[in-house]
Image (spheres, coloured by chain):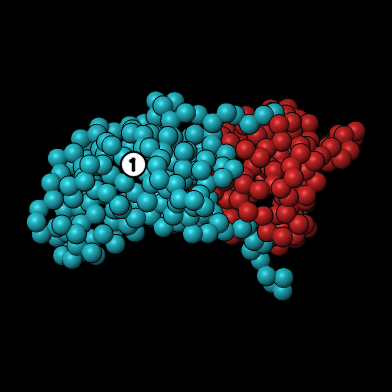
Amino acid sequence: MQFFSGSSAVDISPSPAAPPGTATGLSGNNANMLYIFNRSGVCLLYREWHRPLRTLDASQDQKLMFGLLFSLRSFTAKMDPTSVDKGNLGVPLLPGQGCSFYSFRTNTYKLSFMESPSGIKLILITHPNTSDHQESLKHMYNLYVEYVVKNPLYVPGTPIKSELFNTNLDQYVKTLI
Amino acid sequence: MAPLAPKTGDAVFASVDRVNAELFTLTYGAMVRQLLTDLEEVDEVNKQLDQMGYNIGVRLVDEFLAKSNVSRCVDFKETADVIAKVGFKMFLGVTASITSWDAEGTSFSLVLEDNPLVDFVELPDTCQGLHYCNILSGVLRGALEMVSMKTEVTWVRDMLHGDDAYELRVKLLKQVPEEYPYKDDE
């Protein structure tokens, strides 16, 4: 297993808190957005709970997010001091190569990331002062399996249109701290 | 935080919902029976079972990953072990054994002593070419493809054809690297 044993969070600037008017840092409305991508970069789901500012149109925004994570993965693998087996920067990684990237934090938000070996990527944006979200992402992946993958009418690789999934997601997200 | 330890096959099996084995076996039998009636040709039935298995496999892999906490395998050998010890246990309640690795480590045999799909089954003379459990090879192919491994899965031994066990040969054709999916000019 090519995981870092410690958390690989990149702490950019911890000091100032999120601006007032965004999430509170208390339980209830900490999550801002969630993206789910599949391996081929299709945004299966974009769910928004709190996002006052939008700068790009939706598809540009999603493409940018996917591109950022794709590059970060290749970058973190290249920086890995523990592994001898690293690809060249920009060269596609084979499955199992490289390490997993977990999260980064800015003064206004925190981005948590999980990728399943099947290439499903979950990206959760939350208030910066929340705890580690690896377990929460795992739980969301389980929701995805239960309500999306197991739905026989869902065609794999297409955007998710499931009210049941959304409801359960909304409910779960309220419990995040 | 360290990732959760992968669960053993027994632990996952104990935690998932199960259905009555007889119901499962008979349902599968009824389905194969219907395919034989609809398609008439045994070869077509084999193909259809494989395709159905493939469609199951591409979905099933996510459930497998979510429930078993298995993360990326280091090499194909580990993949084989995980399939035999965790995968088969979780979905069929039996474990398979891994034998006959080739020299390059790219193909192996999965041997099933016990196969819940075939209880009550005897192949009539008209269906001798039928791979009754061809759905399994499709599932393996589909599931492995979703974790970036192109494989070829074939039946080597089949108890319904008079052999002493069920043996599936899994051959790794290619590992697909992750590529940037968007074109630059888009």
Q: Chain of mark 1?
A: B
Instruction: Please state if A96 lies on the left or on the right of B55 as rendered.
Output: right
Chain identifier matching the red colour in the rendered picture = A
Q: Position of residue B152 (x, y in %)?
A: 41, 57
Closer to the camera in the image, B119 or A121: B119
Amino acid type of the residue that numbered disc 1 sits on in the rendered structure: Val
Q: Does residue A48 appear in this view? A: no
Quadrant housing the N terminus of chain B: top right
Q: Which residue is mark 1?
A: B111
With B63 as the anchor, is A9 left or right in this view? right
Give the total number of marks visible in the rendering.
Answer: 1
Residue at the outermost front position: B103
Residue in front for this viewpoint, A147 or B83: B83
> In the drawing, does residue A106 fall left or right of residue B32?
right
Residue B85 visible in the picture: yes
x then y, percent, for residue B68: 49, 34
Q: What residue is shown at x 12% (from left), y 46% (from top)?
A: B122
Image coordinates for residue A101, horizontal then vertical, percent? 71, 42
Q: What residue lies at 59% left-to-right and 29% top-to-bottom?
A: B4
Q: Nearer the viewer, residue A119 or A174?
A: A119
The front one of B84 and B49 is B84
Specify few, some or many for label 1: CA neighbours under 10 Å numbering under 14, 14-19, or 20 or more: many
Residue displayed at 22% across by 42% down: B164
Query: What residue is at 59 percent from the left and 43 percent from the top?
Result: B74
Q: Which chain is cyan?
A: B
The C terminus of chain B sits in image quarter = bottom right
- Left or right position of B171 against A66: left
Pick out the residue farthest to the bottom.
Answer: B185
Instruction: Please state the horizontal and vertical placement of residue A19, each as a whole percent of the image.
Output: 85, 39
- SS category of the residue bearing label 1: strand
Q: Residue furthest left?
A: B125
Residue B40 quadrant: bottom left
